Image (spheres, rainbow, N blue to C red):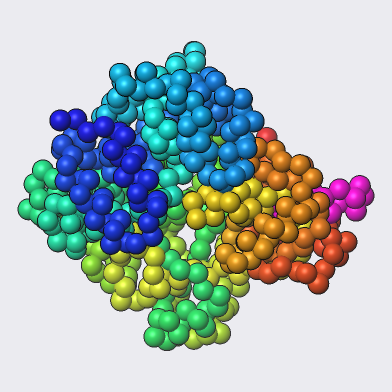
Amino acid sequence: MATLFKSLAELLEKVEATKKRLEIIGMTSDFLKRLDVEEVEPAVSMILGRAFAKRSQKTLEVSWGTLSGVLQRVTGVDWSVFREALAGTGDVGDAVKAVFDKTKVKKQAVLLEKTVTINEVRRLLQAIAGTAGSGSREKKERLIAALLSQASPVEAKYLVKIFVGEMRTGLHEGLMEKAVAKAFEAPLAAVQKASMAMGDIGEVATIAKRKSKEGLSLIGFQVFRPVKLMLAQITDTVSDALAEHDGRTAFEYKYDGARVQIHKRGDEARIFSRRLTDATQSLPEVVEAVKANIKADEAIVEGEVIAINDSGDPIPFQHLMRRFKRVRKVRDMAEKIPVRLYLFDVLFLDGESLIALSYLQRRKILAENAGKIPLAVQLVTDKKRRAEKFLNEAMDAGHEGLMAKKLDSAYTPGTRGKRWLKIKPVLEPLDLVITAAEYGYGRRHGWLSDYYLAACDPATGEFLNVGKTFKGLTDVEMIEMTQRLKELAMREESNCVVVLPKVVVEVAYNEIQKSRKYKSKMALRFARITRIRDDKSAEDADTIAKIKKIYERQLAKKGKYKAD
């Protein structure tokens, strides 16, 4: 019997209501057991907030403007009711549920006649994703309306969360792996290994349902199926890295680019982004370089793509993003913004997984198979001064910093640990003023926790935004900040509260880049609040002029690029 989407939504309500991991695993496991095989992957994906399987290249391409318009038409409720609900809950799904609750009497007759299953939701999502061309927005709206018009309040809540990609119930992939293992009586290690190789716990769950642990044991790396990336922790100094790695480690340049995973079989090569989406079409010269240089019939390698100028010097990251977003006239853009590939790891070669080998062994194999493609510049040392000199060389060459990789470390997909460390010296911190704040989601709902940061333009006295962050404050500080900003509130705009520019915070960041989003024309990259400066008034905060000077000094270390 087909499983109703409502049962999935009710599971998520229970999960959201408890913080007990064992209860979450148990409830999810019981739910998965009851599903038919063809329902498993769609259900797991939707529970984790995804419309489709991870390897799917389908995207819904539904803006909040489109979604909010449909919600208003379906409910017939004035949008001020939604804004009020959002201000009260801080969670878009809860706000939608509250609005649907107000209209449930009018919809009761429809709800008694119509129900929607998990597979029907997936089919409608596929139809929405497949809508393109002239009139596509109207078609999407009709399909979304058809789906939401059949939804109960709790179903509407989680459908909207899937549309906006903000599930945040506390049921993350690690807990889902445990639920899958319990549901289908498979060893957790086997589920985790299969998830690592396939990159998608939803597809692993389907195999576990169909073939149990015997099927999981057969799962391995497959070319053109992207693998979860091994991730690094951040550390402050080369001394910390040396100490963590037993006194000797491999330092590599940390390029200011985009990490890519490259798959090759025969004469075909594909490029996957950090998020494991297919970026092959946007990077034709990388594809050509791989096909010309990597002679192995099958390979999965990793590297970093950076944007360069005519002199071969690295240029700011934001120019590279123009390449990744380009799907038309790619060759023209490739001439305007050329890129360079540096390889730094190999995971799979001619049918053999290499991830259990040490970093040094993999690096040697990579060097033997990279052809003329350069490898990340490397230094293996136990000398602090030599490492610090290497860091300065990387920074002077326009790169972000260094990676430190433990010499005997295996490649562990999907995990973040201390075997890889990232050393990225921050620029001098800035004292900035909070001009507005948005309510957070999930655990942070009800708190003003996403802060707009501004510097004063002395010429006009206006505070100009240069960034936004939700990072840095503790829960207690967020609660106190919420009360403080509410007392300074001038007006509310949907989920955002605009405040008097009174609160000063110290902000760390990794880079200043150009931005069309802000009137200041600049934006802080990876901004995070390091402390609240109650000792300073807004008049003491840093100015736009200072930020421009820092940007210009930073740009001096980058290659020059003339925008078109």
Instruction: Write the start and end of the magenta stretch as one range.
Output: 452-465
- Residue 147 place in picture, x, y as percent: 39, 23
Q: Using the rendered image of the protein, determine whether residue 441 is visible from the camera's viewpoint.
A: yes
Q: Residue at x 63, y 66 (%)?
A: 477
Q: State the residue in front, 455 or 209.
A: 209
Left-right relation of 202 to 186: right
Residue most extreme to the top? 134
Q: Using the rendered image of the protein, determine whether residue 559 is visible from the camera's viewpoint.
A: no
Q: For residue 453: magenta?
A: yes
Q: Is residue 449 above or below residue 106?
A: below
Quarter that holds the N terminus: top left
Residue 363 occupies quadrant: bottom left
Residue 206 occupies quadrant: top left
Residue most extreme to the front? 105
Q: State the residue in front, 233 or 6.
A: 6
Q: Residue at x 42, y 21 (%)?
A: 107
Residue most extreme to the right? 459
- Residue 444 place in picture, x, y as percent: 54, 55
Q: Residue at x 40, y 19 (%)?
A: 146
Quarter that holds the C terminus: top right
Q: For residue 4: magenta?
A: no
